[in-house]
Image: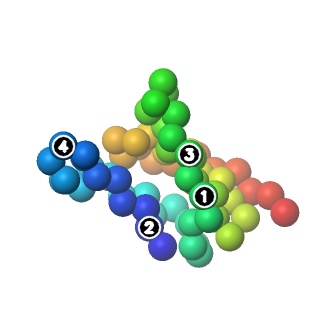
Amino acid sequence: PQLCVFHLGSGRLVHTVRHHKINIRDIDYDPARNLLATCSFDKTVKLTAAQGAEGAEAEGA
């Protein structure tokens, strides 16, 4: 499973998030920090820079 981020003006692929083992359940974007937060059915939450930095991770039950 992956999340693809595209540039709205050009339609160009900007970033691909491949941090989750199974399907992504939800996503949120923080424009002030340029961060994407994704959560998955694998019970993890991943934070990643929208431009492609490696993600941080948190796991829960």
Pointer 3 residue: 28
- Judged by depth in the image, the label closer to the viewer, 3 or 2, is 3
Residue at point 62% right, 65% down? 25
Marks 4 and 3 sit apart, C-alpha to C-alpha, by 20 Å
**Quadrant including the C terminus:** bottom right
Marks 1 and 4 sit apart, C-alpha to C-alpha, by 24 Å
Residues at discs 3 and 1 in contact (Cβ within 8 Å): yes
Disc 4 element: loop
Q: Which residue ends up furthest to the front in the rendered image? A: 9
- Judged by depth in the image, the label closer to the viewer, 1 or 2, is 1
Sequence-wise first label, 3 or 2: 2
> Disc 4 marks which amino acid?
Gly
Pointer 1 residue: 26
> Disc 3 marks which amino acid?
Asp
Q: Residue 61 carries which label?
A: none
The crowd level at tag 2 (other Cα within 10 Å; few <14, some 14-19, many 20+) is: few
Pointer 4 residue: 9
Quarter residue 2 falls in: bottom left
The crowd level at tag 4 (other Cα within 10 Å; few <14, some 14-19, many 20+) is: few
Sequence-wise first label, 1 or 2: 2
Q: In this view, does 33 lie above or below 41?
A: above
Q: In this view, does 5 lie above or below 25?
A: above
- Judged by depth in the image, the label closer to the viewer, 4 or 3, is 4
Pointer 2 residue: 2
Marks 3 and 2 sit apart, C-alpha to C-alpha, by 15 Å
Residues at discs 4 and 3 in contact (Cβ within 8 Å): no
> Disc 1 marks which amino acid?
Asp
Question: Whole-percent x and y of residue 44?
Answer: 68, 59
Sequence-wise first label, 4 or 2: 2
Q: Nearer the viewer, residue 53 or 33?
A: 33
Residue at point 48% right, 24% down? 32
> Disc 2 marks which amino acid?
Gln
